[in-house]
């Protein structure tokens, strides 16, 4: 799933280009989104590969 990871985690770069805010709250929300997406992807991988028998 590297292509999904690439799309999701390059969003931070796109957001910083299109919405150039220098706000700590904004950056915290983006970081939280990325962390949550990483956790969700790990959980999906675990389910996917644990069910593949």
Image: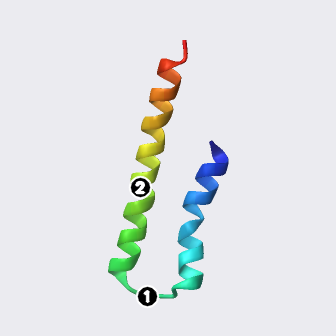
Q: Which element is circle 1 on? A: loop
Disc 2 crowd rating (10 Å Cα; few below 14, some 14-19, many 20+) is: few
Which callout, 2 or 1, points at the residue further toward the start of the chain?
1
Residue extending farthest to the left is 25
Q: Is residue 2 above or below residue 25?
A: above
Give the image location of residue 47, x and y in percent: 45, 28
The residue drawn where x is 46% and y is 49% is 38
Residue 17 occupies which quadrant of the picture? bottom right
Q: Are marks 2 and 1 in contact (CB under 8 Å)?
A: no
Q: Which element is circle 2 on? A: helix
Q: Estimate the spatial distance between the alpha carbons at disc 2 and disc 1, rounded to whole Å.
A: 20 Å
Residue extending farthest to the right is 3
Q: Is residue 29 left or right of residue 13?
A: left
Disc 1 target residue: 22
Give the image location of residue 20, x and y in percent: 51, 88
Looking at the rendered structure, the number of numbered marks drawn on it comes to 2
Mark sitting on residue 11: none
Q: Is residue 14 above or below residue 31?
A: below
Q: Is residue 15 above or below residue 44?
A: below
Give the image location of residue 21, x and y in percent: 45, 88
Residue 40 occupies which quadrant of the picture? top left
The residue drawn where x is 51% and y is 85% is 19
Q: Is residue 14 left or right of residue 51?
A: right
- What colouring method underlies this structural image? rainbow
The residue drawn where x is 45% and y is 52% is 37
- Viewer-nearest residue: 51 or 20: 51
Give the image location of residue 27, x and y in percent: 41, 75
Disc 2 target residue: 35
Q: Quadrant of the N terminus?
A: top right
């Amino acid at each position: 799933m590297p292509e999904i990871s690439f799309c999701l985690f390059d969003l931070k770069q796109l957001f910083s280009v299109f919405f150039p805010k220098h706000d700590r709250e904004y950056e915290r929300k983006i970081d939280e989104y990325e962390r949550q997406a990483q956790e969700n992807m790990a959980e999906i991988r675990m389910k996917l590969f644990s069910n593949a028998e």
